[in-house]
Image (cartoon, grey):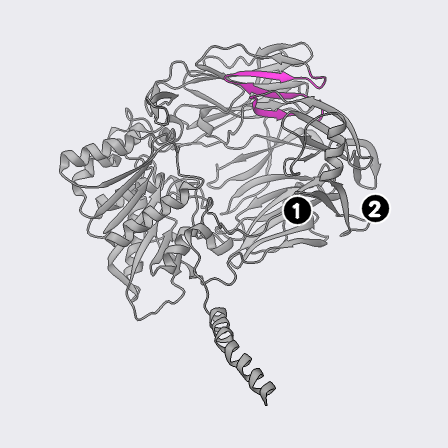
Amino acid sequence: MKIICKWMGIVLLALPTLFATNVMAQVLKKPTLEDLLPGGETYRIAENKWYQWYGDAACLELGIDSIKGIWAVNGVGAKAGENFTVITLKEANKLLAEKELGKLRNFYSAKTINTPHSAVIGILLQVDPLLLLNTGKYRVLIDWKKKELIWNQPCPAQAANEDWNEVSRHLAYTLNNNLYVMTNDGQTRQVTTEAEGIVCGQSVHRNEFGINKGTYWSPQGNLLAFYRMDESMVTQYPLVDITARIGELNNVRYPMAGMTSHKVTVGIYNTETQKTVYLNTGDPTDRYFTNISWAPDAKSIYLIELNRDQNHAKLCQYNTETGELMATLFEETHPKYVEPQHPIVFLPWDNNKFIYQSQRDGFNHLYLYNVKGELLKQLTQDEWLVQQVLGFNRQTQHVIIQSTETSPLQSNIYSVSLKDCKRSLLGNSEGIHSAQLSGFMGTHLIDKSSSPTCPRSIKIMSANPKKHREYTLLTAEDPFKGFTMPNIETGTIKAADGVTDLYYRLVKPADFDPAKKYPTIIYVYGGPHAQMVTGGWQNGARGWDIYMANKGYIMFTLDNRGSDNRGLEFENVTFRHLGIEEGKDQVKGVEFLKSLPYVDGNRIGVHGWSFGGHMTTALMLRYPEIFKVGVAGGPVIDWGYYEIMYGERYMDTPQSNPEGYEQCNLKNLAGNLKGHLLLIHDDHDDTCVPQHTLSFIKACVDARTYPDLFIYPTHKHNVIGRDRVHLHEKITRYFEDNL
């Protein structure tokens, strides 16, 4: 009896714990800003893996403790899909320690070398099993099969813009404003000796026109093309570093619309002769030089020249020995603007033919030319666009592209025949895809994708549409499994023109009640080269969208006319009056929202950053009866304060388009402010300078309207790191207090 009573007591004591555990298991937690935002202490992101190709035979997974591989093909002693270990961190560090070359913490910066031998194994070219490791002090090549260290090169201290060529093993880099080359035997050569105000070997034209670097090695790695940018005549813009006891002045060269721009030339450095030849392009004043590409034999170099009006482009060929112009292959004009963003790409099996990308028919497509500048055929066409050329399958003589053919919301991989232009989808038809083509022959690809319900999938696939072999490397779980998450919907409405379909995303609270009236926040960007609504993970919804929906807000985003991936006419409808047509479309979005019985039409807010900051401010001022609360981050207020390359493309100059600049200058509308508007700006913003926000605040003071202002010290054109959580908490509180 005592034993039974004792047992019953234990059960009774355990019941509260069991009950509590059961209840807790049923209650899902809402993700916090720390969970949802990069920089958060508990930031949750879908599992990812990093891969590089070893030739065409295998792909290597770069990890922390080891590099592992998976065979893509059947070969000597290997089967397709079979895994193997390449090298461990312990093994690599042992090799490095023997020569006192430093130590690795992980393999994430390792690089496979894919320069092929002449020996052919079937259709695959053999490559050495080499890995380039960077210890910080040295670059090191190891043979991962033999576990041998075969070459090393010191890494210069303070080097930036590093560009290493795997054929010659020469390294280009910059120190301050000058360019250097370290040869494969460790000899350092200073290529330029320019004074302050002249920058060499770095990106130019403020990273417009697809430019993201300043050095370009020839195929053989013995010649180096580089940009030289004279910005000594460009007005210096003052930014203040407040971390010093007495604030220090940091000047940046910032060419505003209609003002004097920098001058760019292109040099070619010969590593053997140690001499530099500059291309004889003529007077570089008010001209842009972009999309540099080498001829396969390196005897000539190609670039696209663009006038300052950005409505006339020329593809030019220059002699690399003399720097003289050899030919202007063809020219392209447009009444609004031409926007070259891609260098020409030669066919790997034919040095006399290349692919050129153009929007001449309204969508970015591929055109096949010969070296005489004669158009041979248009390779792709229709009302969709090519987003990227990924490379070539040399076996089938196909070009592999990423395009929007399946849907404007998607990016899919296609194989395009150079013979008959037939296109074939590679991989599944859903979501957003990006791909890395294999080593030399391009017979396989690593396909990385996401869809609205799948955060990440990685597969090895054949680049031959007739072979459907694939191996799954990763299917990531939802990082918010077990959390309360909102409902996401997408759809279309008509633009203000009554014809064009616009895509929207609607995020509803997880506990959505159709009988309730919800406050609604529109997250807006609206500018060129950006698309907010996609067919990727959660349809492109941001972490803050998720957070606010869980707090009881309807979150709405609409890609208005002027945004990306819909063709040239869709984009340039905003030409010379940025923010006007975009605003009309956003108002159509509001009309749609007000038609929904669960939206409180009297409680509508708007938030955006950069171009979205401009849109937020403009909507608050042009439609004060609609928008009650706005938060504008890093906003463009006056396009006359914005930089030349971007601003003049879409607005022309203030001198040629005074009406447009006047109409789009939000300082002129400062007196219209009725709701609550918070402006947020970074004090070191060198993209959209603080003058925008400060001048607007002055205009509001003069007009006796009352916006709010918050500054993030030491940040540039957005808030990153740990402070990003603070930023979004600040934004959240503003809407909670005022909407």
> Which residue is rendered at x = 42% and y = 54% of the image?
32
- The quarter of the picture where the N terminus appears is bottom right
- Figure label count: 2
Disc assigned to residue 276: none
Find disc 2 in the rendering and name its residue: 75
> Which residue is most to the bottom?
1
Question: Does residue 180 show up magenta in the picture?
Answer: yes
The one of 21 and 542 positioned closer to us in this rendering:
21
Question: Does residue 597 show up magenta in the picture?
Answer: no
Q: In the shown orientation, is residue 216 left or right of residue 246? A: right
The x and y percentages for residue 452 are 51, 57
Q: In the shown orientation, is residue 377 left or right of residue 484? A: right
Contact check, label 1 and label 2, Cβ < 8 Å: no
| Label located before the other in sequence (1 or 2) | 2
Q: Label 1 sits on what residue type?
A: Ile
Q: What stretch is highlighted in magenta?
A: 158-186
Q: In which quarter of the image is residue 700?
A: top left
The one of 330 and 257 positioned closer to us in this rendering:
257
Q: Dot 1, crowdedness within 10 Å: few (<14), some or many (≥20)? A: many
Q: Quadrant of residue 175?
A: top right
Find disc 1 in the rendering and name its residue: 446
